[in-house]
Image: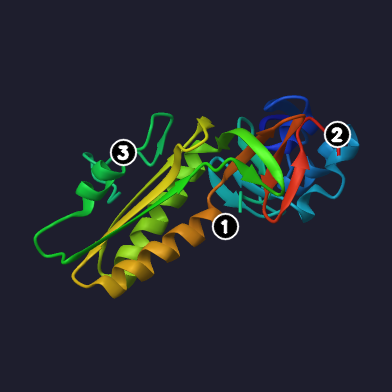
Amino acid sequence: MITVRMLFFAHLSDVAGGHELTLALPPDATVHTAALELERRASGFQNILAHVRVAVNAEFALPETPLKDGDEVAWMPPMSGGNGGTDALPLLTREPIDIGALSRQVEGDKHGAVVTFAGNVRDNARGLRVLHLEYEGYAPLAEKQLLSLVQQAQERWECECAVQHRLGRLEIGECSVAVAVASPHRGEAFEACRWLMDTLKETVPIWKREYFEGGSHWVEGPSVVEANAKV
């Protein structure tokens, strides 16, 4: 037998009864084997591979990906819908985002345009009054994905880019995510900034929990899942 550490995010942690658990699996186990064991343990995991993404040791994996003793397997629902140097601001932070500092990270004499975007916490969503938010992320993979997106944008538009995303509790009006792009001309800066923001919302493993009067829910792709519900 092998021992594998399972990590669960957003509403999957409610189904699992916690953020992690350890499974004993046969030596020839794959991601699919692990999924079958989870389905056996809880009804909320039924057909789990059809509606989640899986990562093994912080790399996206397929159902047939083999598992070995000591592996870390992350189960992630749909995501809530920086030049990488040593002096770069952290891609993920639990501190308030300083969009001015993010802009200064990309500015330079060769750039005539600097575009910034800030996503702030609003006080309403889906007809409900929002009290505050919580962001949860699978940090090892989220950082890799954010850095990859920054590098792709810089190569595609020949610009300088920086991204920063908050984790943890955020109050109304606080900045949850910021993007800064600098390029010689404004057209490329606007395009790169929009692409970065749209793409990170779809692909980076970060989830939003909205708290409102009477309860809370997870935002997973275009859907919401009631928090603590055993679905």
Residue 135 placement: quadrant: top right
Residue at screen point 37% across, 62% down: 193
Q: Callout 1: 10 Å neighbours few (<14), some, many (20+)?
A: some
- Disc 3 residue crowd, few under 14, some 14–19, many 20+, Cα 10 Å: few
Identified by mark 1, the residue type is Glu
In the rendered image, the vertical position of residue 205 relative to residue 184, given as above or below = above
Element assignment for label 1: helix
Q: Earlier in the sequence, mark 3 or mark 1?
A: 3
Quadrant where the N terminus sits is top right
Q: Distance between the residues labelled 3 and 2?
A: 38 Å
Q: Nearer the viewer, mark 3 or mark 1?
A: 3
Q: Name the residue under label 1.
A: 202
* Quadrant occupied by the C terminus: top right
Amino acid at dot 3: Asp
Q: Which residue is drawn at 25% across and 50% down?
A: 103
The answer to whether residue 67 is seen in the rendering is: no
Which percent across, then down, holds residue 31?
72, 46
The answer to whether residue 81 is left or right of residue 172 is: right
Dot 2 alpha-carbon crowd within 10 angstroms: few under 14, some 14 to 19, many 20 or more: some
Asked whether 211 or 109 is in front, the reply is 211
Q: Mark 2 points at which residue?
A: 230
Is residue 149 visible in this depiction of the protein? yes
List x then y, in percent, for residue 198.
50, 61
Q: Are marks 2 and 1 in contact (CB under 8 Å)?
A: no
Q: Is mark 3 on a helix, strand or loop?
A: loop
**What is the C-alpha distance between the residues marked 3 and 1?**
24 Å
Q: Which disc number belongs to residue 98?
A: 3
